Image (cartoon, coloured by chain):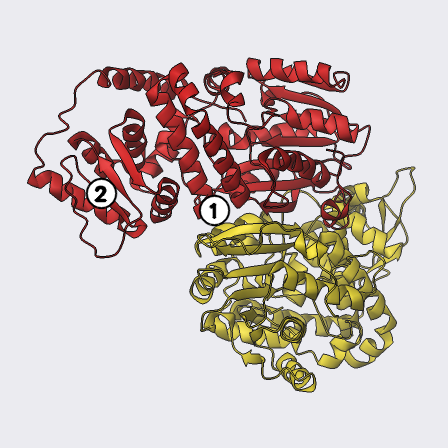
Chain colours: A yellow, B red
């Protein structure tokens, strides 16, 4: 994955961080009297989450919830400001309130997230539309800065809850009973098989994370890989692993932006980067594809978080977790990236439930490591990450977000395989 | 497949048909002198097909082809009008000239079609853009009329060159050495497997052709099928087959337009209809989908001829073979059909080379039956169909056209299978 942001958004975030920090020193009027206005507001909010069977509870223990049927849990709002925020700008205020501890969930939390996510499956609000229209510019410099912001939180932090290979993208549970480790290996291998890699070929990877795929391709498929990333900590980790595993001669980890890819390759692959590029920059990826993929016999794979219909990323996730992030629709990827690059879509697979399961593993591991995270990063950071992981799991469970793997090839090039049965028929790769 | 047209286009076609018939009685000045203007025009045309290594030859045997490298064949233009037509409106005039016998191909004809098709892989011309903008309206009545025009040419005609089940869509050559008959059965079964049909479920099929898929589903998967079509001859054939195969109690063949589908079903399937609906009517298919597919556990499959990038159907094919036809892009299908119907794309497979092979079989069989066709329909009809089959084969071979199978499900519904390996792992269905 990679992260992009604009100076504007960054500036705004810094300001807001300061606000939050100041706020956490303030004593809230959490026991202030509940007025008729609070009750009226609460009723409006309750209406928007009624379908999720979640009961709103105010700071005095009262609730506008009157339905006789059972609930799956309570959403507890601790102060008037948070209530007002949720009524006006639901998604952002929910995240901010949860992170700051001014909002709590009581009950089957995983189920509540899924239900709230489903209940929100409506058309984008006017706020989301404006937001999408103002989606940030990810220039080379700010892109690098924001990748640093998220991915350089420290390899130790990610090691607490990712699998042993540090793979921070959707796994593939070929068998639903697989462990996370096995499912991540299965994902790497599925990607290699879909690409029909042949020994001696050249591969370029953009957004290589901690290098697991590049190393897997070089080690088990005998290809030569140039892998791009702008996260220094990730690159260092990946290079050390390449040396340790004796594939350093076949894998080059390059500290540069995807837009600076040079050379012509048999294969192009990018896992979990597209959703960070931003809508406006999708065309630049098309340009890179067009110039860096061999026209005859070339092929590629894009693996990304996407949508069925166009709408912006949850504003809280965009502010706190992935600034500049935008999960594109298939149509946006075909018209802005693949079409202009004269590529044909050969194959698309939607793995959203596999991402839900991956996130469930991450969430469980994060919960186990919670004390550790808490002592190193503090309560707000911990709650923010809990919310991010649980909310993402819910989004993939409910169909709010999709995970697409798209295989493509230059239009005039024959597809790399006659049918797509081979990835499922071949004997297991030595992983 | 189904066909749609507008009264406007139909009227135009009738007029042009009359022109052609009048023309065939006229003696062309085929031995008229080649002037400096003819030579200049020929040079322009030669430039546009140079990349295909096809040599243009004029009616006096002369050629502007000067390149020293070998050619794969000659394109012989018999008169000035045809030359002028090709210079001004290439695709339409090529088809019209070929059909009327005023233009011939000499050499490796299959290879020439593919090469000419590749050479044409450029941006749409202004003419194509205008044409797309004016794409016809397919109202219920004209749709029916035009289906009649193409599909009711007589079952005997199609029986001359289709497989024994009369399947007029892309086959699936699970093994490249398969016969056409086996590949068509494999296609039917692949569709059923991708849909994960379960005995007792209900299926609606729109554009059912001669009924092969509906019968296959009912017979081997134990589902109940309602299959829509507006071609009387096809429906009669399908109903007779249902009775003969003892599945008439489970398959209902309905003489009606896809827009009149009623009821709610577990499964929606449509093979080879989308490309005939026309861009403007894609939304109506979305409306049908939305109301006729069960939200919980429902799923569907669309199989259609499509494009990588937006451009209209070859104008000659549109005029002579499929009036109102338009092969949509994946983006058009997701934004106009599936998105508005709140469906998630689960899976896409591009089978363009399978369609090229299917068309190769059809072309070979058509060639074997040529004398028969010629004596029943005359030389123009025969040449038109030869061109249509050969041109289509070339379009799928070169990547000019795509064949997409798209599996989808209501957004909030869990996908019907955990992975997509099952269609390739199950033992063969009893076909």
| Depth order, front residue of B201/B20 | B20
Q: Which mark is residue B56?
A: 2
Which residue shows up at 75% across the image and 31% down it? B266
Which residue shows up at 54% across the image and 65% down it? A268
Chain of the residue that carries numbered disc 2 in the rendered image: B
Q: Which residue is mark 1?
A: B308
| Depth order, front residue of B227/A416 | A416
Residue A2: x and y in percent read 60, 69
Is the N terminus of chain A in the top left, top right, bottom left or bottom right quadrant?
Answer: bottom right
Q: Provide the secondary structure element on which disc 1 rests.
A: loop
**Mark closest to the chain's N terminus, 2 or 1:** 2
Q: Nearer the viewer, mark 2 or mark 1?
A: 2
Residue A31: x and y in percent read 86, 60
Residue B195 shows in the view: yes
Report how many numbered discs are placed on residues in the image.
2
Determine whether A55 is above or below A227 in the image.
above
């Amino acid at each position: 994955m990679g992260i992009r942001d604009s100076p504007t958004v960054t500036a705004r975030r810094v300001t807001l961080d300061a606000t939050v920090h100041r706020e956490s020193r303030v004593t809230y009027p959490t026991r202030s009297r509940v007025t008729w206005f609070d009750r009226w507001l609460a009723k409006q909010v309750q209406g928007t989450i009624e379908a999720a069977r979640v009961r709103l509870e105010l700071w005095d223990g009262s609730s506008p919830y009157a339905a006789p049927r059972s609930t799956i849990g309570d959403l507890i709002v601790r102060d008037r400001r948070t209530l007002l925020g949720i009524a006006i700008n639901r998604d952002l205020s929910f995240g901010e309130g949860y992170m700051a501890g001014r909002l709590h969930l009581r009950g089957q939390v995983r189920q509540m997230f899924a239900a709230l996510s489903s209940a929100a499956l409506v058309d984008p609000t006017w706020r989301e539309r404006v937001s999408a229209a103002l989606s940030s510019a990810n220039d080379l410099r700010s892109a690098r800065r924001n990748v640093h912001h998220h991915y350089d939180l420290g390899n130790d932090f990610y090691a607490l809850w990712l699998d042993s290979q540090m793979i921070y993208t959707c796994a593939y549970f070929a068998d639903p009973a697989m462990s996370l480790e096995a499912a991540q290996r299965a994902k790497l291998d599925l990607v290699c098989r879909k690409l029909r890699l042949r020994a001696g070929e050249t591969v370029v990877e953009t957004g290589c994370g901690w290098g697991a795929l590049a190393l897997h391709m070089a080690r088990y498929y005998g290809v030569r890989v140039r892998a791009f990333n702008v996260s220094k900590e990730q690159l260092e980790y990946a290079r050390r692993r390449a040396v340790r595993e004796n594939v350093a001669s076949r894998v080059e980890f390059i500290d540069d932006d995807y837009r600076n890819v040079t050379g012509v390759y048999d294969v192009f692959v990018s896992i979990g980067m597209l959703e960070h590029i931003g809508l406006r920059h999708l065309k630049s990826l098309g340009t890179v594809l067009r110039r860096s993929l061999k026209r005859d016999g070339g092929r590629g794979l894009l693996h990304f978080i996407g949508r069925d219909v166009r709408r912006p990323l949850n504003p809280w996730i965009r502010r706190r977790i992935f600034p500049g992030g935008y999960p594109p629709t298939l149509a946006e990827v075909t018209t802005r990236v693949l079409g202009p690059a004269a590529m044909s879509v050969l194959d698309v697979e939607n793995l959203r439930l596999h991402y839900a399961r991956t996130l469930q593993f991450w969430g469980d591991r994060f919960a186990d490591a919670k004390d550790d995270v808490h002592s190193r990063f503090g309560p707000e950071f911990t709650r923010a990450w809990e919310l991010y992981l649980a909310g993402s799991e819910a989004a993939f469970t409910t169909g709010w977000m999709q995970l697409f793997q798209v295989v493509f090839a230059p239009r005039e090039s024959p597809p790399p395989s006659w049918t797509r049965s081979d990835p499922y028929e071949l004997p297991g790769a030595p992983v």
